[in-house]
Amino acid sequence: MTFINYAAREINCKIVYYGPGLCGKTTNLQWIYEKTNPSTKGKMISLATETERTLFFDFLPLELGTIRGFRTRFHLSTVPGQVFYDASRKLILKGVDGVVFVADSQAARMDANVESLRNLKDNLKLHGFNLATIPYVLQLNKRDIPGAVPVPEMLSALRVKNEDYFEAVAPKGIGVFETLKAAARHILISLKKAS
Ligand SMILES: Nc1nc2c(ncn2[C@@H]2O[C@H](COP(=O)(O)OP(=O)(O)OP(=O)(O)O)[C@@H](O)[C@H]2O)c(=O)[nH]1
Ligand SMILES: [Mg+2]
């Protein structure tokens, strides 16, 4: 739920990066964090295991300018992709304003992509959200992997509503800000519609 703080003239929005284990969600946030002006970002909090898998979440408040005199702060989180952390994923979706689904372009991960997308639909429903109407962007990550699944094939398996999609190589920053900006833009459009 978008949180508008009138006293501070601030609009707070939450974007969740969703997707299967090791698809590159944390890598997206790390790139954004590294390339963002220190004055516009908060601390990145990462709770990970020794092996770098996200156990709980990554969180990064980011200012992307003002609308009608209100500063907009985007809080970015990732879910842990590993199948058995479903309780954490449910929790992190609470109050979400927009979702980025990060898909892994490796053929061997297509089933995991599809399963994670189904899990996203179910978990959104639990919070009263609908994938069909929530601001939503698809990222096809790991495009650098040899033998990456062709884009049209990925789209026919994963695209749900003609949403914007971006090809990405997250560790190199390719497609990372494009994805984030599209998600932010869709949230702002939906806020304007609602107001
Ligand atoms: N070649 C390649 N490797 C990538 C890409 N994106 C991420 N990786 C690598 O994939 C591994 C997993 O990336 P993470 O960002 O930790 O994945 P995650 O989605 O956060 O995984 P969980 O937290 O377990 O859900 C890391 O070794 C990354 O460097 C990419 O576009 N290309
Ligand atoms: Mg992670």
Image: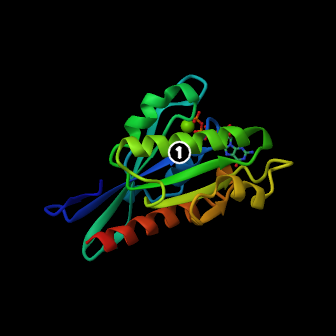
Image: 51 above or below 175: above
Q: Residue at x 44, y 61 (%)?
A: 133
Q: Position of residue 156 (x, y in %)?
A: 71, 58
Image: 131 above or below 71: above
Q: Residue at x 50, y 59 (%)?
A: 136
Question: Quick check: which quadrant has ligand 2?
Answer: top right
Q: Quadrant of residue 107?
A: top right
- Colouring of the image: rainbow
For disc 1, the marked residue is 18
With 188 as the anchor, is 157 left or right in this view? right
Q: Position of residue 65 (x, y in %)?
A: 36, 69
Q: Residue at x 45, y 36 (%)?
A: 89
User: Farthest right residue?
Assistant: 147
Image: 11 above or below 91: below
Q: Position of residue 117 (x, y in %)?
A: 58, 45
User: Farthest bottom residue?
Assistant: 68
- Quarter of the figure with the C terminus: bottom left
